[in-house]
Image (cartoon, helix red, strand yellow):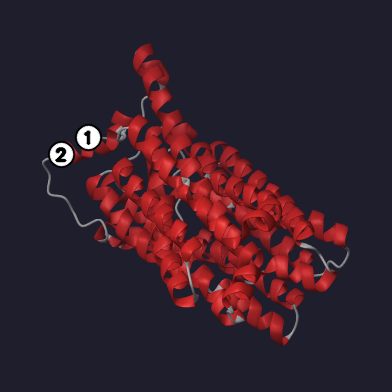
Amino acid sequence: MADKYAASPGDIPAGKANEGEDYARKAVIASTVGYALDGFDLLILGFILAAISSDLGLTSTQAGSLVTWTLVGAVVGGIVFGWLSDKYGRVRVLNWTILLFAVFTGLCALAQGYWDLLAYRTIAGLGLGGEFGIGMALAAEACRPEQRARMSSYVGLGWQAGVLAAALVTPILLPLVGWRGMFAIGVLPAVVAFVIRHFIGEPKIFIESQKSTAPKENSFKLLVADAKTTRASLGVVILTSVQNFGYYGVMIWMPSYLSKQFGYSLTKSAGWTAITIIGMAFGIWLFGQLADRIGRRPIFLLYQVGAVLSVLAYSQLESQYALLIGGAIMGMFVNGMLGGYGALISELYPTQARATAQNVLFNIGRAVGGFGPLAVGAVAAKYSFSHAIALLASIYVLDIIATLFLIPERKGAALE
């Protein structure tokens, strides 16, 4: 089976090769755009929490819980929709997740109080959780082995593009349309869902796996099929947990910190966020380029060491300009590892469990990451925000240990 899906363009007739490249391009674009809209929505929430709290009379705990429960919904959605995708198809289920996310994000604009808004955010999170893993599986299955890390990193870049767009447009649009109008923009994923369904079919490797007469194994059990696979699953959970914890811990609280500590306006906070996100995007892009050339494990280790050093250094910065430059460098290492998960997870599991693995393992990490804002907020309240950031550096040491002892190297492996 391995060689069947690993043929190079030179082994395939030109027409078929071009057809494959065209499909891969569409699959990556569809996955990237869907993930961009997710990132756009989630960061908007961080920017408009103050406006929501003021209008609906929310406490700081209630406001923070909107983020946490969105991520809780994402964990449940990731598990459910990942399993459904392995059973019914990548494109079909991706369409469901985007529609669910779009409808309930739009309903947030009609919320009358805390409890109905919390319900809408949680259900929207179900759709958000499903999109990452399905899109990653779709992109990985559509492209050639030697391009897998790069193509997967492009999907990861979609999130950064969405977050960057949110950072740039929220200061402009929020005064004009209010927080309800910002949520109403979330209906845009419905359009993306239509485009995906209309132009893209299922990847060849998934279709072939569905034709197999062999008994279908439970996709969840395949994540712990044997000792080697179980170790790899544990390693991936640690990697994704650390990455999400650090990412959400920093990004959700940073606008408030900059405002209180340095008197940043919403526009200035958005400018800092934009520079940091550009650093993250560069880190994701570079990760994909290096991982396809050198290997997954060496680049993960490089970024993890970089995260420890850059987070520690950032916690000591006081100048506004140093914070700007330091934020970009820290973002490169802290979130650049997102460029490697899609390829790594795709290569560790068979087709009948690939989307399940992507969504379950990444969203367990996202569940842990959901406590990042709470932990950072608690430490910052007792000591200081700089102390909270410095403590984040220690979690990347755990990342390094997991990569060294639990993660195998599967660079360019043919998908099973």
Residue at point 38% right, 44% down?
A: 137
Q: Which mark is residue 208?
A: 1
Q: Work out which quarter of the rendered image holds the N terminus and state it.
A: top left
Which amino acid, mark 1?
Answer: Glu
**Callout 2: SS:** loop
Image coordinates for residue 271, horizontal then vertical, percent: 76, 53
Q: Which mark is residue 124?
A: none
Which amino acid, mark 2?
Answer: Ser
- Residue extending farthest to the top is 14
Residue 98 horizontal side relative to residue 65, left or right: left
> Which of 403/160 is in front?
160
Mark 1 crowdedness (10 Å alpha carbons): few <14, some 14-19, many ≥20: few
Mark 2 crowdedness (10 Å alpha carbons): few <14, some 14-19, many ≥20: few
> Is residue 157 positioned above or below 4 on the image?
below
Image coordinates for residue 78, horizontal then vertical, percent: 37, 59
Can residue 292 be seen here? The reply is yes
Image coordinates for residue 25, horizontal then vertical, percent: 46, 29
Residue at point 33% right, 41% down?
A: 91
**Callout 1: SS:** helix
Residue 340 horizontal side relative to residue 267, left or right: left
> Is residue 22 positioned above or below 244 on the image?
above
Residue at point 44% right, 60% down?
A: 107
Can residue 370 be seen here? The reply is no
Query: In the rendered structure, are the residues bearing label 1 and label 2 in contact, judged by CB atoms less than 8 Å apart?
Result: yes
Residue 179 horizontal side relative to residue 405, left or right: right
Image coordinates for residue 48, horizontal then vertical, percent: 63, 64
> Which of 99/394 is in front?
99
Residue position for label 2: 212
Q: Work out which quarter of the rendered image holds the C terminus and state it.
A: top left
> Which of 248/144 is in front?
248
> Is residue 85 positioned above or below 245 on the image?
above
